[in-house]
Image (cartoon, coloured by chain):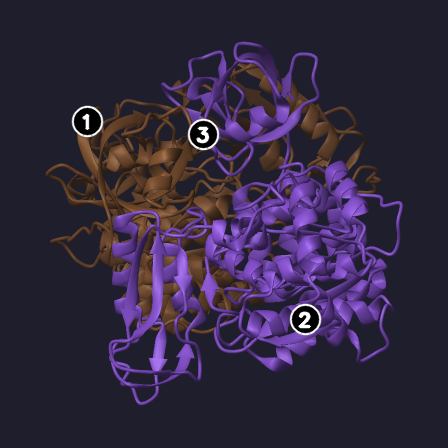
Chain colours: A purple, B brown
Amino acid sequence: MSEKTFKIRKIDIKQGAFEILMNAEDAHDLALKTHDRVSIVPEGLDGKTVIVNTTETLVEKGEVGVFHEVWEDLDVNEGSNACVVPVPKPRSVEYIKRKIRGKPLTKEEMRELVKDIAKGNISQIELTAYVVAVQIRDLSMDEIVAATNAFVETGQRIDFTVHPIFDVHSIGGVPGNKYAPIAIPILAANGVTIPKTSSRAISSPAGTADLMECITGVEHDAAGIKQIAEDVGGTLVWGGGVNFAPADDIIIKVEHPLSLDPHGQVLTSVMAKKLAVGVEKLLIDIPTGENTKVPDKEEARRLARDFIELGRRVGIEVRAAITYGGQPVGRTMGPALEIKEAMTILEGSAKPNSTIEKALELSGIILEMAEIVRPGGGKAEAGRTLTSGLAHQKFLEIVEAQGGDPAIRSEDIEAGPFTAEFPAPKDGYVIEIHNRRITRVARRAGCPRDKGAGIYMNKKRGEMVDKDEALFTIYSESEWKLKDALKLAKQTRPYTIEGMILEDVIE
Amino acid sequence: MSEKTFKIRKIDIKQGAFEILMNAEDAHDLALKTHDRVSIVPEGLDGKTVIVNTTETLVEKGEVGVFHEVWEDLDVNEGSNACVVPVPKPRSVEYIKRKIRGKPLTKEEMRELVKDIAKGNISQIELTAYVVAVQIRDLSMDEIVAATNAFVETGQRIDFTVHPIFDVHSIGGVPGNKYAPIAIPILAANGVTIPKTSSRAISSPAGTADLMECITGVEHDAAGIKQIAEDVGGTLVWGGGVNFAPADDIIIKVEHPLSLDPHGQVLTSVMAKKLAVGVEKLLIDIPTGENTKVPDKEEARRLARDFIELGRRVGIEVRAAITYGGQPVGRTMGPALEIKEAMTILEGSAKPNSTIEKALELSGIILEMAEIVRPGGGKAEAGRTLTSGLAHQKFLEIVEAQGGDPAIRSEDIEAGPFTAEFPAPKDGYVIEIHNRRITRVARRAGCPRDKGAGIYMNKKRGEMVDKDEALFTIYSESEWKLKDALKLAKQTRPYTIEGMILEDVIE
């Protein structure tokens, strides 16, 4: 193949893929078309496979435009030289087509494909084709095991000196799911080492990392996570700051716009990240109920069994808890409101509610897995750790270890400042809070990016409400976002009152 | 939803999709993320739905960067104002997900989806998901009919004053398939009105439009095509210059990088374009054999039956011919070499070969469909039109009507100038010419963009060759492309000689 030297020009556009921009004439001379693959080799550095895009004017002849992701990855300087060498499609593209045709991939093929994804050698079109093929054709357990191991191989790992390492992970799908800031301190206070890494919200109002970021640092590298967990017993950090399973992060980028979440990919994604962190014993929380990710209990059981089987094959002891997810957990949604609610519970000033119940149930199971209490005694022991104040003390230790102020109190956290109450259209009992609709309202109000945005649920399922009394209160950092959120709430009606006629069915 | 006014800045990058670029802060203010959809509404013009991309520096706050496809479509000026209004995902995205789940789409849903595709409302990720879903789940005949009609509705149409309108279309997959410049003049000379529109090469060495472009104009608008066909009886133009089925052109862009060609999409794509041109009687050529698109004869018959059924339901009388495609047609591949070979045949100075046979067979069938000859007499009549010189005379009329010089002779056409012969590795009979491998060599030499690039096949299947005698000759316009092509030929060995040991199996 022929090659040519070009001057590098940085182009600050995030393409969501590794792409470069060539002048149309240069591309023609190298017989390259849009979407073709080349290796770009900066002088004295290793080459990287990228996808070609062309322009007639933005990049001159002899220049090569390098998009954000590529110059971040290559670490090149404006004006330096690079060779551009046409390269053929990687063999993995053939494997994707094989998967489309319904043929299984071998362990070696799966590893090669994951490697190419991690290196950015697979274009967005090809990656989407893979995700849709996996959604329709499914992955066998052999393929899932191979993919999980390959995800870990291509990323960073933590190697703990203490053992065993525990974790608890919720597959998501229910808003307000703020058990972690309560459960992790309970467990760490009992001597369990539990380096919890969580995600930021993708489609929910807030992820655990978004909550913690209101009061402390969540971006720590692998060495930092290890240090904090070994020092204070637990972490509540963002997992995305470490390159744990880079292929997964790339796959998620095409899953999200399609809101696809193929069964095999859920398993691989969760387990690879846990393996990378060094987790040895894991509790999986599978929220089930109307308008969750897994609405069907039989499907939840299948997922639970698959997690356990996958764990067995990659060396993690897994237990799975199917939890109720048919309405939001607790009273709040949104980063600031949720961490405020969790801290109120830790401080001992909250009334009984579903957040407390869930946090105690989940930490109870882990206390039993860790053999700290006899089977059946976990929840009570977790409750004692909470009411004794030991969990609160441990929480503040974690906050401090992650860089926050240990003197923080729940009343210091402010949401808002723009708020609006949503009134009940009639008297009656609340019979449903629609997870997806209430989530959309919270996101329209600014969640998760505006930390103060969110929803306080004045009423929950089964509670009595009078006409015009507040069902829920929307918080926002901007007046127009509040207005938009209120408008959406009126259109979509996330609450159902017994006997209410559903005039508008939007979703 | 909120909106804001921005200054337009043109960004000359072809994204292969309708996209704009916003400053990250502006995007955040409008609660927009990469891949979200907005409507961009230039002052005093209609809005257009586009996909958002973000940058930190390339576009300032208050500016909106408009990529090539968008400013071509909107026809806006640099520096003018436009509103940006967030819009929700179109319902069609839900239909794509339904297709992924294996559910059929109704006629109305299919129409809405095709409309959104034609308008550029569907992102590349979503479109890829659709194509893969169609590949795996297949389209029912009802869906194919709905898609075909919607493809036509969303594009331009020709309304002929003469009737009936004929056409012949090859589904492709065999290189060197240059029957059209011979068959169309034969038919037009017999009084058949046949406005043939063809494609440029996508994955082959040359399309009929690439051939004709060596000697005349091929880019005509709908009115031009109608005029030429009504004046001289036939055209040999490029169909891509008219907006016949815009949704199809958009779908092809994601099919190509995956080399996917779903059954339902092949039917829809071909028939929609024929309907748009006003075709009433159509002959479909389905080349079958090793390394063609449809290697299996049973699959070819199924495709033939589906074409006939689809034709019946959209109002086109279809006949289908399954032809031999197990090796390239004729002696040449590549634009200049192929049109030269076709003209040699029209001029009467060629030896019998597979191009002549195929052109006469296909035009014979149409002469019978047109009831110009009795059943069974078509091929002989086509042969008489060829040998009498009438076809040649008609061909030159078409060349002139399309803007070329009617005095053109085959010897005026030059290929090359760089050539290399590929020698036989041993004595023996040629038992195979591998369609895909020889095509890759021709493309490496510069086909289809370099018109003079191509391959002359000194030997074809069944012919005897001596060791070191030329099997084929590569033509190129550049010395290094010739070198590359020769190297690829040595690696992939597109010819098999009887008794030869295949040491290197590349594909």
- B503 to A457, vertically: above or below: above
Q: Earlier in the sequence, mark 2 or mark 3?
A: 3
**Marks 1, 3 in one chain:** no
The residue tagged with tag 1: helix, strand or loop? loop
Picture quarter with the N terminus of chain A: top right
Give the class, few, some or many, for how many residues have Cα within 10 Å of label 3's Cα (few <14, many ≥20): many
| Subunit ID for the residue under disc 3 | A
Residue A452 at what x, y percent from top left?
42, 50
In the foreground, B252 or A137: A137
Residue B142 at what x, y percent from top left?
37, 73
Residue A207 at what x, y percent from top left?
55, 55
Whole-angstrom CA distance, mark 1 to mark 3, is 22 Å
- Seen at 23% across and 44% down, the residue is B3
Q: Mark 3 — residue?
A: A13
Give the class, few, some or many, for how many residues have Cα within 10 Å of label 2's Cα (few <14, many ≥20): many
Q: Given the image, on which type of amino acid does mark 3 rest?
A: Ile
Q: Is residue A427 visible?
A: yes
- Seen at 73% across and 28% down, the residue is B490
Residue A360's disc is: 2
Q: Mark 1 — residue?
A: B77
The residue tagged with tag 3: helix, strand or loop? loop
| Subunit ID for the residue under disc 1 | B
